[in-house]
Image (cartoon, rainbow, N blue to C red):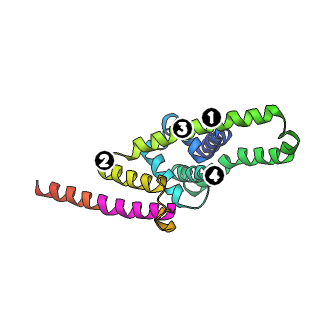
Amino acid sequence: MKECFDIFLTFFRMGCMTFGGGYAMFPIAERELVKRKGWTTMEEVINYYTIAQITPGVIAVNLSTFVGYKQKGIIGAIIASVAFVLPGVSLILAAALFISNFADLPAVKHAFAGIRIAVGALIVDTVIKLIKGTLKDNAARVIFLLVFLISVLPLGNLPAFIISPVFLISVSGLAGFLIYRRKKTSAGDEAAKQ
């Protein structure tokens, strides 16, 4: 019971501190789940983000579900997800009731401008950490560079499906599978020879 309560409090606190979506949550997840609680590693968090990108739902909730499940199975996944969502849902309900009365106030507009800047900084921090955590070899760097160039450069002659994130992620996943499977097989063969 104590573990369940700890999971609830941790994810409730994270839900209270997370503004700007899943990527802005990355530094909070690192601090709370990796450094403070030791429930997961940074590599696992990056893997959870990767899985959350290709599964339906909100990144932050998916991360909460994965870590909660790792800690306490299905009950942990449910507790972590509900605890994380609870502050946001409460805030959205309160905002929906009162925002129309305050949205045009200069103080509110200025506060939102500051929040957008802070969220942008948190997202940049997350991108840097994700790049450092994933670009560990030349194959990863090549895949990253190709996907980045295809998604950023104005490639008007390419069919739209090639520029689609779904296509890019699928092809990258297939390339990673083939490259790293071959590397693992080669490493196993080398070890067997010695």
Q: Nearer the viewer, mark 3 or mark 1?
A: 1
State yes or no: discs 4 and 2 in contact (Cβ < 8 Å). Answer: no
Which is nearer the eye, 71 or 169?
A: 169
Q: Which residue is mark 4?
A: 81
The kind of residue on which mark 1 rests is: Ala
**Marks 1 and 4, the one that precedes in the sequence:** 4
Q: Which residue is mark 1?
A: 118
**Marks 4 and 2, the one that precedes in the sequence:** 4
Cα gap from disc 3 to disc 2, whole angstroms: 24 Å
Most frequent secondary structure within the magenta stretch: helix
Cα gap from disc 3 to disc 1, whole angstroms: 12 Å
Q: Which residue is mark 2?
A: 137
**Marks 3 and 4, the one that precedes in the sequence:** 3
Label 2 neighbour load within 10 Å: few <14, some 14-19, many 20+: few
Residue farthest to the left? 194
**Marks 2 and 1, the one that precedes in the sequence:** 1
